[in-house]
Each structure stands twice: as structure tokens, then as C-alpha cells.
Image (tube, coloured by chain):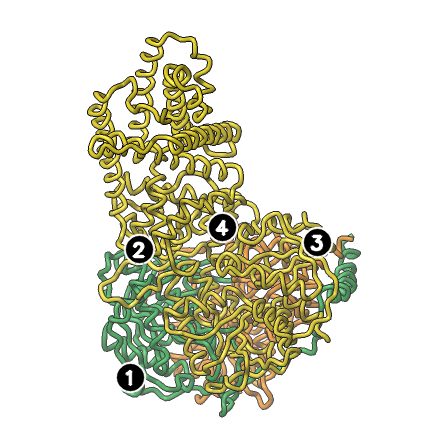
Chain colours: A orange, B green, C yellow
Amino acid sequence: MKALVVCEARGGKALDTTFELLEVASRLGAEPVMLLVGEASAIPAAAGRLLLAEVERADAYDPGLHRNAVVEAVRRVEADVVLLPHSSYGWDLAPRVAAALRAAQVSELVALAEGGGLEVACCNGKMRRVVQPATAKVVVTVQPGAFPAGGARGGAPSIEGIQAAPAAPGIEHLGHEAPSAREVDLGRASVIVSAGRGVGKKENVGVVEALARALGGELAASRPVVDSGWVGADRQVGSTGQTVAPKLYVACGISGAVQHLAGMKGAEYVVAINKDRDAPIGEVADVLVVADLLQLVPALTARLRQ
Amino acid sequence: MKILVCVKQVPDMSSRFAPDGAGTWFAEADLAHRINEYDECAIEQAIQLKEQLGGAPEVTALSIGPARVGEALRKALAMGCDRAVQVDEPQPSRLDPWQVASIVAAHACAVGYDLVLTGMQSQDRGSGQVGVLVAEQLGIQAVTTAVSFEHADGAVTVRRELEGGARARVRVRLPAVVTCQLGLNVPRYPTLPNIMKAKKKPLDVVPAASLLSAEPLARTARFFAPSRRTGQVMEGPVDQLVDRLVALLGEKAGAKRQERT
Amino acid sequence: MDATREIYWNVGRGVIAPMYAVALAAAAVFAWGLRQRLRVWRLGAPEARLQPWGARLAGAARAVLGQGTVLRALLPGSAHALLLWSFLLLFAGTLLVMAQADLTAPLLGVTFLRGGFYRAYSLALDVAGLVAVGAVAVLLARRLALRGRLETRAADLAVLAALLAILLTGFATEAVRIAATELRDAPDLARASPVGRLLALPLAGWDGGALRALHRALWWGHLLLAAAALAAIPFTKLRHVVVTPAGLFAGDRRPRGALATLDLEAEGVERFGAATVGDLSWKDLLDADACTGCQRCQDRCPAHASGKPLSPMRLVRQVGEAARAGGAGAALVAEIGADAIWSCTTCYACQDGCPAGVEHVGKVLALRRNLALMEGAFPGEEVRTAADHVEVNGNPFGFDHAARGDWAKELGVPVVAPGEAAGVEVLYFAGCQASFDRRAREVAKSFVRICRAAGVSVGVLGKEERCCGEPLRKLGNEYLYQQAARANIEAIRARAPRRIVTTCPHCLQSLGFDYRDLGLEVEVEHHSTFVERLVAEGRLKLAPGALEVTYHDPCQLGRYRGVYDAPRRLLGAAGATVVEMARSRRDAACCGAGGGRMLAEERLGTRINAARVEMARETGAPVIAAACPFCLSMLEDGIKAAGEGERMVARDVAEIVAERLGG
């Protein structure tokens, strides 16, 4: 069995998700072949075989061109499985590849069930499904952070050039917009106290922020909180925000949507404060405190300050 | 101009999910349903475009499922869609994304839409495939994860949300499919007169079989609750919880304080 | 000699024609002016407020003559009541004079103002005049003394000054007449007019001709002033002497808090609530004219007191101003402001304290209905989210609806299946707070323990229970309210319970009153009255334990339902001593959660619950007893925010009782 590992690059650099995809390939017992659609500078430092479809303006993602490159690579290596990261790149590209190959797509792989079943998250992360493809080939997007980095780091792949057929003109890339200036680098914080939808309203964010200060850490927030404008976008943790790896992560009123879990799974120790005993955050928490955060957190902060 | 909005009715995510008899999806009992949040943004975008173009576009909302999805469609009509199509399917969960897309594509092909809007994913299954698959099956362009939307001169300019707060601006000529991310807009709250008018708007019921010819490419073998990481659960009166947490957090954060100095 | 006086003394019967001409002219101006006001009232929508006229007339007469509400403010109330009563007496006296001089004497030759009756008549009018002067003086002095605290316009002072002038010219006319006549001819008779006589004494030595000239001038001055006052009634705050009785006559006779249940499906109806003057009822526009600006509503308004942009008085006046300036089409929301409209807690303190029978709350709700139903508006995003949760999950918090009965499962309280309510004496409607809020759940548990101790079997609706819809209704969203109501009514009807008890006065409002319009007829009771009866009937034995508490009257139970004594008696039976707050019972201050504000963030001004907790703190009682989960939550938050958590706790009466089960 062969697995085509589609590498994602951002800003001309390879992303580490490639190593997670290599791990999945290895657990599937598949021989991995990497594919990079982009420029040579973004080739990941991983030993193995890599197909390079060099494109001009690599930062201007052209879905049709990328699809053609993946399809060509699949043909070239006779891949049975195509692995992509479940990112804005992967979830955009994967269905296009699947449609072209008439292959089943399995989205957001979080684990391999016994017997190699493809386990994916559903119902906002509360539940799991095992998906059974009915096609010979299968396209899989893998949740970032769900698997440890695999493959051989530090090596240099053997590179084969391939040619992707140009796609019919369709989507015109007009440019990128950088995220608004980031005041804090949550990625380097060792204590993070994070506010979720459970804080209820903007005024209550202060309660969480006070705990962060009492613990000498940074305030962070989940996506809904940022969307509501309660906390600035620069403090968002999750798949569309920052990925963090603090020593202590305190999740206040965060239910634990997978998108959020993806951003904080690297935390060493997780304390979750939530009213709902069944909240999915409990899955990754070392301690789940079942309580109303608006009662508990101020009391806790007051005691810590003593 | 004709606009299609694909709407999924999903259980409220606060529900307790339990596997159904076959163990391949959740049991329907005790579930409260609502419109998939992402699709609500798609409806709002369609209505905003209709308003921008002086009411000219006809907006059709389509949903696949049993009679209960009529509630979701009525809400879409109350928000401002002109007509609705319920593709009657007693057990929509048996359809895989490819089949769902083929139903939408078959309908869209027959009507000829200039723009298809839908959510980037559903809250329940969350595969995030249908929008792109519809476009692929129709042979038109798809843009995913839109957080802004502008229409001018037969083209749509969209900001796609990337990671870390970055965005890409892309332009696509119609016809096209656009999938909507949360934050694209704030879906409107239907007014009472519009709720009442919605009751009189056409809602066609079409049997799924009339639109479905594709075979599934995948099926769900098992549906279950994830095994919990063996974390500790603390419950009890707030004062006791505080006592226990102060020591714990002090230890975990204290180690860090030393590190920093 | 028969004690009497010559009517038209000095001025002669020749003045009759000009006098009546002046009076008629004044009456004509009065009628014309009143008609102008009536025209404005008729801009409003029709509303049946005239039947049954007998009972309405009796009620209005009682309110006007008894001055009951007016007297709730002691000093200005007494002054007003005395002024009214004495003016009525003076007016009656004038009518008697006219009756004798211009009707009975010339036509029938009958005179009755003579002898003992005349003496009594004269004395009564003199005393009434003196009282009236005193009352006006007090009111004037109060207006001047309270400048800054009491909004006083020049017109307010002018009206009082005019009344004083009428009274004083009356006395002066009398004094001059007495100086010229009775003092000289019948000094004994002069004693029947003590005030007049006292004022006449210094004039005793005056020349008769001078007195007569002065008398003529004063007589005319008095007449013209009185006529001017009559003519001025429709154009000044004096109009309340006509409009307020009319408003009291047309008052709302339904139980407090009743709201018209809108027919949302009515063919051709595309407008709901009040967007313009014409959408309000004629009584709403009359109210604007009935208002005298006494400011009692504003002084009692919790929103106003906490710095929010709502004054019930200003709102009522703005309605009138909009009507007069813009007619039926005048837009109201822009005039009044959405923030003011959303600030109301529908606590009814304004309306309950209004001596003029003005209906403030109905106007706010009509405006909210328009905002909610026609604009899809909410006071904030968080309220929209809550409303959405009610629609989908049947509770404003967004908890799984199927988990609603979980608390009862833990206690082994049965969920009543359709048709099986016969098995339980009481169907307990827990409400959203008690179902999902950990704190309020303790109240539910206490209630169940109490029932068990009294041998009362209790069942619940479990997941078939939904939010009663009261907060949404008060926020104007009649659509979601009716949706919730119909689901509850169906669930309740299917079970046909003997009696429903709820620990939430908001649920009581819905189930016991509002749902009747939608066809639910079932006995619904608040737990405070139900448990109190269990004690009174001897079914519930308590082991009283001494405790000092202050009791917070929930608006929805007190002013709405008039339940003030049962919770206090119940606390007494439990051994508690109730120390009253500065404002209690009918005058109780709101906790801030009524009118759907429970679901809303309090963004403007200071916190209403903080003010209430401060009043409780002043009593020194360590426990604030409440009888409403909304109040309980607000009071707890207020205690925490005030840093009084060590010294005070908020508890439901059921919790206090449940700790004293025994015997």
C-alpha cells in the first residue's frame, strides 16, 4: 500500500503537519511518498521520497492546479491513500482530489481505530465515527495535533519533479492579508488561562483575565469568544488561531470543540472548568472541575492572590 | 439571477448524543433541532446579496431530510428566501457527502443557479466536503471558508480564512459555489410578518430518489462516544473546589514562575 | 332677625348678566380646549374601556374622593387631598348661592341660605377656604424647597399661585363685605365667618363708600380669576381635574399584568405593537394628559434610580408630545429611545404608585412588541442567543432540553406521564432556573422535601416542561412566548393535573394568568401560598427556629398578585422574625430581573440589585428571604458584588422552611 503525503507550506516554509501525516501513513502500514506543490525552498526536512510540482507564485493557491498535481502524483506513485492536513488548505483541496479520483474522502481523522478503522470527530467533537470507504482509493484529511510527529526528521528527501497540468482559469488570487498585529505570542507562554463561550458575556472576560494575572499567565480565548468581539483575535487559540503548548492550560467555560482542542493539545497540564460534566474538553483535561466558572474563578483568584 | 442556499438541519450541540440501534449514527429521540450555524450565515449572505441587487435574485433554500427539515426551511423563508425545496429523505444520515452533493447538483443542474451558498461544514457530521463536491459535480468553481463576500459585475470577491488570522482574497466569476465560515455575517432575526409570509411561500417536496443516482463512496461503520482521557473530575461546593485547586494551580504555575526568573 | 346675607350685595343684580356672560365665555373656552385634547386622544386606537360604566364610575369616584393613592405620599398627598376636599366644598357653596339667587328665589320665592343653616354654611366655607389656602401654601413651599429634586416648571408654580389668588380674593371680598355690613349691623352673624371677620376687623373704621368701591373691585377680580382658571383647565396641568377622573374611570380592570394576547395569525394584520402614536390606544394618549408631573413614578422606578435612560413620567409625556406634534403617524421609538424602552423591568412600581391611574407598563410593552416582532430587535446579542435557546432547547441557557428533569430523577420525583396526573396531588412546574441552575435547584429540592413532609405527592413534567415564556413576552416577543406557551399547555392538558405549584412567580404569571387566553384553565399556585396553607391546615408541622430575616417582595408576586402576607406568615411559622426594608410590600424595590431583564446584561447605569441589597443590608438582618428564583439570583449577585458574602445570604422561603421540618 502506498500513501501520498501532501505537504503544506505557508509563507514559503514547510509545515510540521507533514510529519504527523507520515506518522499516519506509517500506522496504516503504507509506504509514504511526499508531494509538495510549491517551491523547492519549502521542501520539508524529512527523509524519503518527495515529488515536487514546482509552481510559480506558490503563495497564490490555485485549487485547480494543486488538484491536478495531486492527481498526477497519485497516478505516478499508484497511491492508495492521499493524506492531507485538515487545514484551510487541506479541506479545500481534498474534496477536489476525491472528486477527480472518484474516491471516498474521510475528513478530520483523529485516530486509527482497532483494525485500521478511520476514526473522525463529529458532533462538535462530542462524538466519534469510524468511516468505512467503499472505494479503492481514499483521500484523508488529518486533524493537526491528533497524531505525534513521525517520519525521519532532519533528513533530506529524494526529489522527483512532476508536472501539473494547468487548470482552467477560475479563481483569481488577489493577495494575502496578514493577521492583525500580534501583541502576545501565546505560543511562548507557559501559563495560559482561556475563556470560552461559557463566560456568557464580554463583561465576564475580566474574571478569567484576573485568574490569568494571578497565575502569571496570559489570557486566551476560544473562537466564539473572539467572534463575539469579547477578546481580540490575537488571543485566539485553536485551529484558526494560535497553537499553544504551555505547561499549564486552564480552560474556563470552553466546551472543547475540536478546532479548539487542536490548538491546545500540546499543553502539558490541562485544567478545565465547566458546568457540563460531559463537555468534550474533559477528554483532554487532566482535571475537569465541574462548576460555574463565574462562582469558582473569582473565589479562586482571590485565594491565589492571598 | 438565481441563488441556491443549501441548508442542513442539525441537532443542537448541547444534546446528549447516543448511538442509534444500528450503532452507525445518533438516535433521534430527545434531540432538539436547529439550522446548521454555518448554513445560517449562507442564508444571510444570500439575502444580503438579494437586497443589494434590489430584490431581483430569486433565492431558493434546499434541505435534505424528513418532514422536520421543513421547520429549518420555513425559517430560511422567514429570513428572506423566496422558495424552498425539501428533498424528502427519511434517513439523511445514510447518505454520504458524495451522495448529498449529487442530490444538490442534480437539483441545481435542472434549475441553473448562478450562485450556490452553503456552510463550510455541518455541526453534526462536519466533513466539510459537500460544497466543493457540488461544484466539482456541476463543473463550476468553489471557494471555501468565506469570511467576507462582495458581489460586483458577475463576480464574487471573497476573503478566505486561513490559519492564524491570515486571510486570502480571491475573486471568482459566477456561476460558483461559496462555502461560508462563521463570522461572515450576523444572521438576521426573522420578523413576525416575515414569519407569517414564509408560511405562504412555496415549499416543494421532492422525493430523494428522483434526484439521487450516485452510490455512496463511504459509509459510517460505527458511531460512539470517545473514551475519556483518564483525567480527574472534581465536583462539590465551590469553597472545597477552591481549596483543592489553589494547591494544584500553585504547584503547576509556581514551577513556571521559577523558570522565568 | 334671620341670619342670612344679601346676595349680590353692593354689586347689584345688574351684574348677573355680565357675570354669566363671563362664566359662559370661560366654559366655552374650557369646552373648546377640552375638545382639542379629546381630538388628540382619538388619534389612538379604539379600546373598550367604558363598560361596565356603573362599576367604573363607582371606582373612579372612590379613587377621586377618597384620594387613596394620592395619600400614599404623606405630605404632598395630604395637602392635595385637603385642597381637593375644600375646593369641592367651596364649589358646592358657590353652587348653592347661585341656586338660591338665580333660581329658587326669583322663580319660586324660596330662600334656604338663612338661619342656622346659613351660619353652618358660612362657617364651613370659611374653614374650607382657610384649609385650601394652607394646602396651596404647603404645595408651593414644597415646590420651592425641593427645587432640583422635584422637576418644577414655571407653569407648576403659576397654577398654584392662581389657586392662591382665587382663594385670597375670595376671602378679601368677604372681609370687605363683612367690614361694611355685618360688623356694623350684625356682629354676632360675623362670627359665623371667622376668617372673614378676622380680616374685616382692621377695616372696621374705613369709610363705607371706600369699602363698597373696594368690594366691587375685589368681587370682579375674584370672578374673573375663577373664570380664567376654569378656562385654563384644558391648557394647564389643571386639566387633570377633569382628565384624571376620566382616566380612572377608563382604567384597566383586568388582573395586574394582563396583556392582550395577540392574534398572530390574523388575516391582513401586518403591524404588531406600537411604532407610532396611532398604534397606542386612546387611553394611552389620555394618560399623557392625566399626568400632573408629580414624579412619583420616576422616583420609584428602579431603572431611573440606577441611572438608566428611562423615566416613566417622561415616557408618558413624550407620548403626548409626539401625538400633539406629529399626529397619529408620529414615530415613538425615535422620540423615546430604544435604550429607555429596554430598561424597564415591568416592576409596576410606577403604575402602582400613580395617583392619576396612568398605565406606564402597557406602553413600554406595546413599544417592545413592535421592536421585537417588527424589527427582530433585542436589548442585546446575549438576549437574542437566550431567545434562540428557548426556541430550540426550551430554556434560555442552551442546556439540553432532555436534561430538564435530571434534578428530579436524583430525588426520585416521578415524571408524570400523560393522563397520569391523578396519581399526584401537585404537579410541580419547576421553571428553567430550578431545572438548570445549581443554586435554584436547591429551592426545588427544598420544595419537594416540604411536600414529602406534609404528605403531598409531587410529580413533574420532566423534559416535557419548557420555558414558560414570560421573560420573552415581557421583551415583546409574543411569537416565541406563544410557541412556548402552546407546548406547555399541550403537555399540561395531556396530564390534567389537579393543581400546579411553581416556585417561580414568573411561571405563575404565565401558567396561572397569561395562558388562560390560550385556553389553559387549571389551578396554579405559588409555593409560598401553598406551603403557608399546608401549615395553616396543620398538614405541615414545623419545628420553628429563631432567625432574623428581611423579606424581599418579588414584584411578580407582590405588586402583580398582591401576595404580601403569606410568605411573611410562613417565615413567622418557621420561627423567623421579619425586619422590613425601607421599601417593602407595595413599595418594594425591584431586584432588576423583571421584564425579561433576567436574560439581559445590565450595561447602562449602576446595578439595580446593588441598590436593593443595600436596602436589605440596612436592616441588619443576616438573611434576605426571597420567593422568586430571579430575585434570589440577583440578590446573591448583589451580595457578592457588595462584598457582604460573609455577613448576608439570600435564601428562598422554601429553603428556610425546609430546614425546620419536624414535629
Quadrant of residue C20 in the image? top left
Instruction: Name the residue at the front extreme.
Output: C1
Instruction: State the SS at label 2.
Output: helix
For disc 2, the marked residue is C53
Q: Residue at x 52, y 83 (%)?
A: C416
Q: Can you see residue A78? A: no
Quadrant of residue C16 in the image? top left
Q: For marks 1 and 4, give the one nearer the viewer.
A: 4
Residue toward you, B136 or C497: C497
Mark 2 vs mark 4: which is more N-terminal?
Answer: 2
Instruction: Tell me, for residue B35, which label it has, or none.
Output: none
For disc 4, the marked residue is C349
Identify residue type, mark 1.
Answer: Leu
Residue C58 rendering spot, x and y as whole percentages? 37, 52
For disc 1, the marked residue is B211
For disc 3, the marked residue is C621
Q: Chain of mark 3?
A: C
Residue toward you, A285 or C476: C476
Identify residue type, mark 4.
Answer: Ala
Residue C587 rendering spot, x and y as whole percentages? 54, 50
Instruction: State the SS at label 3.
Output: loop
Identify residue type, mark 3.
Answer: Ala
Instruction: State the SS at label 4.
Output: helix
